[in-house]
Image (cartoon, helix red, strand yellow):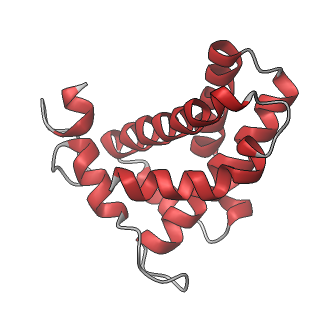
Amino acid sequence: MLEQLMQLIQQSGQQAVVDNTEVPNEYNDAVLSEAQQSITSGLQGLASTGELNALMNTQDEAQVAAHPAVQNISNNFMGNIMEKFGLNKGTAAAIAAAVIPMVLSKMMNKGGGQQSGGGFDLGGLLSSLTGGGNAQGPQSSGGGLMGGL
């Protein structure tokens, strides 16, 4: 599941990160990995509190981008890449705005079996993040990717 997520991030981040002259080439992969970490930890938090349903009910990228949880994930990602890679606020904000909502929108549409088609198993990703628990309930202790961290 995480490989599929990283593929979505790489596709969405090509222009915003890899083709961006403000991001030194040696940081491209690390910035994309940071996006993955921000998304997975954000989704885990939403799943553990039961707030994921509201995000899953969004219909398009604009609604996803405006969702408070997505804004929090984007802000956390922006702060992390500013701190870790020395990117200026404008560049970091542009990257966060281009990558995080687009990836989450694609995940919500594909994961929900809507018109975008299958391919991304949001339930499988959430299960791996929460140790096999459901997306609505609390995280089971000690299991899954995040439990291992």
Residue 112 at x, y = what percent? 43, 74
Image vertical order of residue 140 relative to residue 149, above or below: below
Q: Which residue lies most toward the front here?
A: 26
Image vertical order of residue 146 relative to residue 129, above or below: above
Residue 55 at x, y = what percent? 52, 56
Give the mark count: 0
Residue drawn 75% across the image and 40% down it: 95
Image vertical order of residue 48 relative to residue 14, above or below: above
Front residue of 35 and 142: 35
| Quadrant (top left/top right/bottom left/bottom right) for the N terminus | bottom left
Q: In the visual, does 57 lie left or right of 26? A: left
Q: Is residue 95 visible?
A: yes
Q: In the visual, does 120 lie left or right of 87? A: left
Residue drawn 12% across the image and 29% down it: 142
| Quadrant (top left/top right/bottom left/bottom right) for the C terminus | top left
Front residue of 82 and 49: 82
Q: In the visual, does 71 lie left or right of 109? A: right
Residue 12 at x, y = what percent? 65, 56
Q: Is residue 57 visible?
A: no
Residue 138 at x, y = what percent? 23, 40
Residue drawn 50% across the image and 65% down it: 108
Residue drawn 77% across the image and 21% down it: 87
**In which quarter of the view is residue 63 placed?**
bottom right
